[in-house]
Amino acid sequence: MTVKTAKTYSAAIDAVVEAAERHGFKVQAIHDVSGTLAEKGFEREPLTLIEACNARYAHAVLERDVRIGLMLPCPLMVYEQRGQVFISTMRPTAMTRIYPRANVAGISAEVERILSEIIHEAAV
């Protein structure tokens, strides 16, 4: 799920963090991926990963299948491509295909709805 924003790269990062927190997600880490790659000699356009977690939803899916922890916390990404800034996230409903026996369709759909709201709010 990806949306384009007219915001600057750094303003988009701030907007994602603020929107996530408004929706009950705790931002656990912010990774400057492009900066880390540049330190190793790999240049690329700006890219930041924001790890956000809602404890209630995380607990619920981990109770169903602890291996879902491999998909947590929820990643949100802000990146710049050819001068345009984008905000993106993975669709949590994808975990229903990876862990079909966990029976998390309802939970993942709810989290996906919230993440969609976060990225759309952050983009405006």
Image: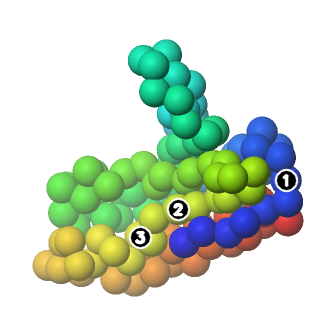
Q: Which residue bears the numbered disc 1?
A: 7
Q: Name the secondary structure under disc 1.
A: loop
Indicate the position of residue 110 as horizontal and vertical percent values.
Answer: 51, 78
- Name the kind of residue labelled 1 in the image: Lys
Q: Name the secondary structure under disc 2.
A: strand
- Name the kind of residue labelled 2 in the image: Thr
- Residue 77 higher or lower than 61, as above or below: above
Residue drawn at x 29%, y 71% as measured from the top left: 95
Q: Real-space Cα distance between discs 3 and 1?
A: 25 Å
Q: Real-space Cα distance between discs 3 and 2?
A: 9 Å
Residue 89, label in figure? 2
Quadrant location of the C terminus in the rendered image: bottom right
Of the pair 46 and 107, the residue shown nearer to us: 46
Q: Real-space Cα distance between discs 2 and 1?
A: 17 Å
- Residue 49 higher or lower than 114, as above or below: above
Residue 92, label in figure? 3
Indicate the position of residue 98 as horizontal and vertical percent values.
Answer: 20, 71
- Residue 5 higher or lower than 37, as above or below: below
